[in-house]
Image (cartoon, rainbow, N blue to C red):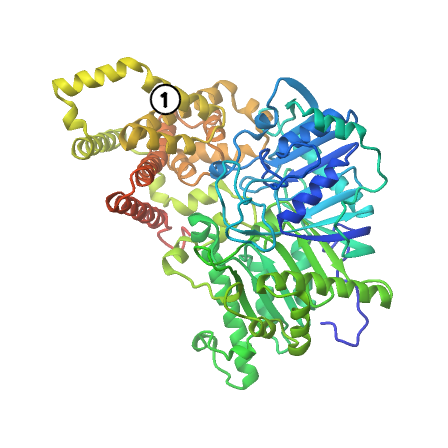
Amino acid sequence: MQTESSPRLPLSRAGSNCWRVEHADRFKLLVDADAYFSAVRAAMREARESVYILGWDIDSRTQLVPGGADDGLPGQLGEFLFALVEARPQLTVHVLNWDFAMLYALEREWMPAYKLGLGWRKQNRLIFRADGQHPVGASHHQKIVVVDDRIAFVGGLDLTRCRWDTSDHACDNPLRIDPDGKPYAPFHDVHAMVDGDAARALGELARTRWQRAAQSSQSNVAQDVSTQNLPATDTAAIVLATAGQQPDIWPDGFAPDLTDFHIGIARTEPAFDGSAGVFEIRQLYLDAISRARRFLFFENQYFTSNVLCDALGTRLAEPDAPEVMMISPHTQSGWLEQATMGALRARIHQRLKAADTVNTREQSGAGSSLSDTNGSADASTRRYRMYCPHLPGLENGCLNVHSKVFAMDDELFCVGSANMSNRSMAFDTECNLIIEIQGDEAKQAEIRHAITGMRNLLLAEHLDVTVEQLAQSLQQTGSLHASAAALHKDGRTLRELDPQVIPELDALTQDNAVFDPERPVDADQVVAQYIPHHARKPVPRRMIGLGLFAVALVLLTLAWRFTPLKDWVNLSSLITLARSLDKLPFTPVIVIAAFVVAGTLMVPVTLLIAVAGVVFGPLAGACYAIVGVTLSALLGFLIGQWMGHDALTQMLGKRINKLSKRMAQRGIAATAVVRLLPIAPFTIVNVVAGASHLSLRDYLIGTLIGMVPGILLTVIFSHNLAEAIRHPSMETVAVLAGVTLLLMLAAFGLQRLFKPRNAAEA
């Protein structure tokens, strides 16, 4: 490791831990979406030739300036972009969104390409693509905006719903509402703005990704969508038409943190379709961890990377280990992330505590082993600590930290889209910017001052103190941890976080391969892991028939016992029912047909199932959903048979071959596992199954086995949730709690059922 007296060598190296090192005229750190959204809107307003927007999620309804921009242009992102291209004949706007997994369907805008295309007139210069050019299970996670190749934005923020917030994160801010007018919790993230040659390089990166997405097959959603034009207001057209060509499009009111220096651009790109993977961000983290002498400051949404944990653990075990400060949310967003990414984070946190404890005990001469330390080292000697920003008034008391930032000593600062997860290090597409001290002594001092200032700005925000107060404390203590303790107070502050490993959740996340993978998901490995060998044998028809008959009897018994069915079988109820059906004679046919059509058109079937439970109740909703999903699956299968395997490969690419082969080889078991653990969209699985050699019987049985439990649980949960909202009482809340408990027990039971029976199978 480099010593204090040795000459400093650059850490960022093109071709190793970064893609390019380019000159930047100006750089500005944009803390929280209020600053970023205002700056990016101001820059796009001055666009003359091109705008590239790359994101993990993009919502056309997003209000970039909720309080009103006062510039004569529409407020919502989609309408704003239409106004730009309508008023400027030379301008083309390219919007690239991740071709997201159905798991996120409930959180996203439906059919964003269509939403951007509201209106009647064609506007071919606002082009939308969905990026599906990545391995199965991976995602496009870069958040980049480039305007005219003159200014670029990189960071952790998407132009989407529930991101906007100010740095005071007031719990009662009336402007923090989603497109439906519902308030959401405070949200913290960080972005960056840069111009000069660095912006031109990022424009090149954006165009390369855009062209790669264009290589998707014609059947993929990731096609050009020639969108239709939302009529711009007369005011907007006048404002844009009369605006003169300005030599400088850097937004007013955003004084740069740095000028006239070189900045690194680092990427993650998974190996895909014959191209080698790019892992520059991972190498950058490893190099920074190895070189750090005093501080490693991390502010990140996730912390689940095994590689980074091993590197930090190695440093923490050394006598001269740097301080490691990790700022992270108290809990992950939603129950699924808490049960997966939260459990993985807790496991890594405890490993680092153990490594840090061994170091501190060895320094004190205790010489105790790892097994008997239990994190009981003197708090003043601990080098590694995790914190969460505490906000009074919130339900869980913790600010939602979504940023992806780190700083090494006072020498390096990095901001971008990459989480400290396995996915971001090797599996998803990411982009980070790197600022490192460079140049002569005067320039080094300038950059060191900027790096220190940006790190302190973030830390001061969480401690609710001024940057000057924090700088003074750091000067006195020489320690990030000591300063956090000295400035700790009641109210808004940083609180130390100690995520615990919960045995039940730890058992569910024994391997990162499904929840936080480092490489493409192999359908064969998934089936081999979760289905025992003896369970892959063909099921006798007699046993299948007896099983389905038993299920039908159970469902009928439950219907007679727990539904109004027993009350309907009388003259009066039958007349009433007949009259209601006379008003809507084709309701079941219409609902089932909607499932078939929507499932074929890639509409999320999970959403339809939940709606069926809310509107029609658990029984009818489940029946509609099961029949509709089965018929939709059958239609997709027949389409695949008609297309044939060769045509399917041409349309969806060679990567679909593996899924096809595994499903054909493993029959019912493979189909059931793919339904239980969806590694490909519902419609794609249907078509691939039909084009493979899988029999229709095995396919339908596997689909029912894999989807019926989920359908039943979904409709029951959604129905009881709606009842608890519509008719709040102790009874409805108790029923909802019971159903939620059943959902958790079912998930645990499935894990135990599909757990490998012995080491050889594992």
Question: Residue 587 location, x and y as percent?
Answer: 33, 18
Q: What residue appears at the point 51 percent right and 21 percent down from the top-left corner? A: 644
Residue 63, by quadrant, is top right
Vertical placement of residue 373 versus 229, above or below: below
Q: Residue at x 52, y 77 (%)?
A: 379
Residue 482: % across, % down: 59, 75
Which residue is at the far left?
Answer: 570
**What amino acid does circle 1 point to?**
Val
Residue lying farthest bottom?
A: 365
Q: Which residue is drawn at 29% across and 31% down?
A: 617
The reply, left or right, for residue 273 in relation to residue 634 is right
Q: In which quarter of the image is the N terminus?
A: bottom right
Residue 710 at x, y = what percent?
35, 38
Mark 1, residue position: 591
Residue 23 in sight from this viewpoint: no
Where 147 falls versus 515 (above or below)? above
Judge left or right: residue 104 versus residue 713.
right
